[in-house]
Image (cartoon, helix red, strand yellow):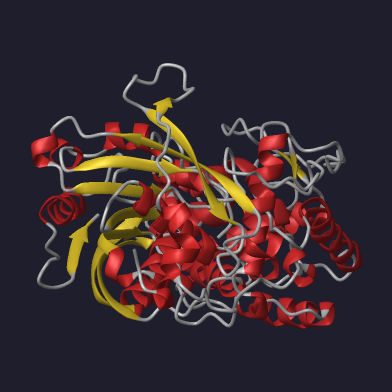
Amino acid sequence: MPRITRVVALAAAGLLAALSLAEAQGATTARPPVADHTSSLTRYYAQRPAWHRCDAPGAPASYQCATITVPVDYARPDGPTLRLRISRLRTSTPGERHGVLLSNPGGPGNRGLGNPLSLKDALAKSVLQRYDLIGFDPRGLGASSPLRCGLTQDQADDTEPYRPYRAATFAKDTADARDVAAKCTTRNGSRVLPYINTRNTARDMDVIRGVLGEKKLSYLGWSYGSYLGAVYTQLFPRHSDRIVLDSAPDPNRFGRGTVLDMAAGAEPAFEDFSRLIARRDGTYHLGDTPAKVRAAFWQLIARADSTPLLYQGDDPEHQGEALTGTDIRSWLRPYFAAAPYQAAHEITALRTSRPTNRATRPSTGPADVTTDNSVGLNWAITCADNTKSWPRDPARYQRDARSTSSRHPLYGDFAANITPCAFWPRGSEPATHVDNTVGALVVQNQWDPQTPLPGGRAMHRALHGSRLVYVRGGRGHAVYGFPGAPTCVTRTVDAYLTGGRLPAADVTCAS
């Protein structure tokens, strides 16, 4: 799903966030199988990392880093390799140690090397006593053989990677999407780019397990990280230990379906927002019925689309900007689910903003290296994991955008519009179908703007051995380990991670 870090900030500030051949290659692969796991991959699993103090200012000496190698293509383990950067914080109570806890903060495109430091401050002592905390930058990202695409600042906009469909700009949007795909392909080549995918990242995770000398891997992942964890359980069920998947997308719709699900989820969140704000008409003056609140919002959008509004509210990110109605929809869409009263406050402020002729011009200079890498990696995973979900015919996007926008007016034109995935090289493997009996805990807020509730329920159904921890009334993206997480969630996940037993039935927590 898209990297909207401001949404994570809305949820909470402080945390980002030896196997059989059939498992090693994955049950649904159409690629040539590895003839013998022991002979072909032993050199990767048998690595002994040279641990040293991480180069992280202010970090404790116990925070250690190492570099290992993994094959670019697991079907050809004697071919080119990638360097993978991993980190660890060992438990200070060896007598209580259960194993290792690997984590991923999501994205795709968010680095995970520093996760042990974040988790050290976020998790309960009882959990920290059980595990060595393990972090890593996934292949193609950060310190792990990073991709470089050479994108412009406008192309590397990581706050809103999807552009709204407009008939007048569709030709330009198509050309720009083609250019992003061409830049990433030219810079990284067919020998690497098709192999930057979730299946290979999951295989890398199993190599990490092996080099750490562990029989099983426990895992904690948020957002995209929950999908990554689910793929690991599909490829390596016998090596999956205690698995926590927080804020999950539908694992069998990953790709274009994930983005379309965001648009579908925006509508009920907007309806809920309108009900809440109608009860507080004395504060926000947007209308005393849900219908009036919605009408006030859409009147604002029409006005701003006619002439941009000069924002002079409290949000420093938009201070002094000329905002169109499209800008406002993109900006406030996650707030309707995660922070409805903040959304109402911003709408109230915008209604008094004055029109401006100032135009917001695209940023054409080169993107900084970190953002270029993160956005390029995001597209690589989003596009290549399920290439069949992305049509190749630009006209299909035009038709889909019109129909999706009519059903989901808040965000449908963004979600269905053309992206670089229409021109991305085919992935090296088919999409992973998640369907297994591995035990896992799926944690989900009711009002999640990035991975709406139906996705979490779909993840629960795909993992037949899982339990769902549902936060009724919960708002925002990511729950466990974040400030403000309900005690019910924390208690349930802590008990699973420390004791290893899932709840007898699904759990419903109050927000």
Q: Tell me the residue at 55%/77% (across/down).
A: 431
Question: Where is 148 relative to 405, above or below?
Answer: above
| Residue positioned 31% across, 37% down in the render | 119
Q: Residue at x 14, y 59 (%)?
A: 500
Give the camera-side residue of 266 and 372.
Answer: 372
Locate residue 302, reporting x and y percent. 73, 60
Frontmost residue, 80 versus 101 = 80
Residue found at the very far front of the displayed protein: 39
Question: As rendered, which of 447 and 55 lies closer to the eye?
Answer: 55
| Residue 372 visible in the snapshot | yes
Q: How many numbered marks appear?
A: 0
Q: Can residue 450 be seen in this view?
A: no
On the rendered structure, is 36 left or right of 221? right
At horizontal 74% and vertical 36% (from top left) the residue drawn is 321
Q: Nearer the viewer, residue 338 or 134?
A: 134
302 left or right, relative to 393: left
The quadrant in which the N terminus is found is bottom right
From the viewer's perspective, tell me whether residue 223 is left or right of residue 395: left
Provide residue 281's location: percent of width, then percent of height.
43, 52
Q: Is residue 362 above or below residue 396?
A: above
* Position of 412 relative to 315 (above/below): below
Q: Where is residue 195 in the image (x, y as percent from the top left)?
A: 63, 63
Residue 111 lies left or right of residue 447; in this view the side is: right
Where the C terminus falls, by quadrant?
A: bottom left
